[in-house]
């Protein structure tokens, strides 16, 4: 857990790493820190759980700082939907993108249709993975629009608001 006050080793003008709680955090979600996702597990192409381990920032055997796994802290988390939010990293091929067989655009980003759907039905992409490295406001906007497209895909109708540029039919 991050400290609530500015730590002594982060004086002004450095941005302090402190615990911040917003209204979004107060809506009932549990917050967890220092977890590394080891695996997504499930059956028949559906995720059922995540396997994690707690990590600590420490120096490894080579004297280089990094995150080291804490033995005995493995945990399974039930899940039926996983949304990855990774900024300024760009999509990495060779893993999930290749495993799912997702098409890429000319810039190496995940190719999508006008509703954030990828070349594989039921798989959606938004933000940096779809448009390339950009501002967080674009990631937020695209995340909301992708959520709307996922909702339409799962329910068959749209009940979520939009920024007004999409042509998904609105119901309600």
Image (cartoon, grey):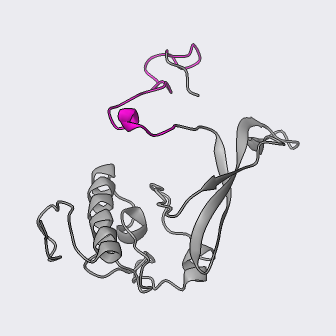
Vertical arrangement, residue 51 with respect to residue 107, above or below: above
Q: What is the total number of numbered labels drawn onto the structure image?
A: 0
Vertical arrangement, residue 147 with respect to residue 69, above or below: below
Task: Assess whether residue 19 is covered by the magenta stretch.
Answer: yes
Left-right relation of 116 to 165:
right
* Residues rendered magenta in the picture: 5-30
The residue at 54%/77% (across/down) is 97
Q: Position of residue 43 (x, y in %)?
A: 64, 76
Vertical arrangement, residue 71 with respect to residue 2, above or below: below
Quadrant (top left, top right, bottom left, bottom right) of the C terminus: bottom left
The answer to which quarter of the image holds residue 115 is: bottom left
The residue at 28%/57% (across/down) is 138
Left-right relation of 130 to 73:
left
Decide which of 90, 123 is in the foreground and name it. Answer: 123
Left-right relation of 73 to 76:
right
Residue extending farthest to the right is 61
Q: Position of residue 55 (x, y in %)?
A: 72, 41
Task: Assess whether residue 76 is covered by the magenta stretch.
Answer: no
Quadrant (top left, top right, bottom left, bottom right) of the N terminus: top right
The answer to which quarter of the image holds residue 39 is: bottom right
Decide which of 123, 151 is in the foreground and name it. Answer: 151
Vertical arrangement, residue 106 with respect to residue 128, above or below: below
The residue at 41%/77% (across/down) is 107
Q: Position of residue 168 (x, y in %)?
A: 18, 76
Q: Main secondary structure of the magenta part?
A: loop
The answer to which quarter of the image holds residue 142 is: bottom left
The residue at 39%/66% (across/down) is 132
Q: Position of residue 74 (x, y in %)?
A: 76, 48
Decide which of 76, 9 is in the foreground and name it. Answer: 76
């Amino acid at each position: 857990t991050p400290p609530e006050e500015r730590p002594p080793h982060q004086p002004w003008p450095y941005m302090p790493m402190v615990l911040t709680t917003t209204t979004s955090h107060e809506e009932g979600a549990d917050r967890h820190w220092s977890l590394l996702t080891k695996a997504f597990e499930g059956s028949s192409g559906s995720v059922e759980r995540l396997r994690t381990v707690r990590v600590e920032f420490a120096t490894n055997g080579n004297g280089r700082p990094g995150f080291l796994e804490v033995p005995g802290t493995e945990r399974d988390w039930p899940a039926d939907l996983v949304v990855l939010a990774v900024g300024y990293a760009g999509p990495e091929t060779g893993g999930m993108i290749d495993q799912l067989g997702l098409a890429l655009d000319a810039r190496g980003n995940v190719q999508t249709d006008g509703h954030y759907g990828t070349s594989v039905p039921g798989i959606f992409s938004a933000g940096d993975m779809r448009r390339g490295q950009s501002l967080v406001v674009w990631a937020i906007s695209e995340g909301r629009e992708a959520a709307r497209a996922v909702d339409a895909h799962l329910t068959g109708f749209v009940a979520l608001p939009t920024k007004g540029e999409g042509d998904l039919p609105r119901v309600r």
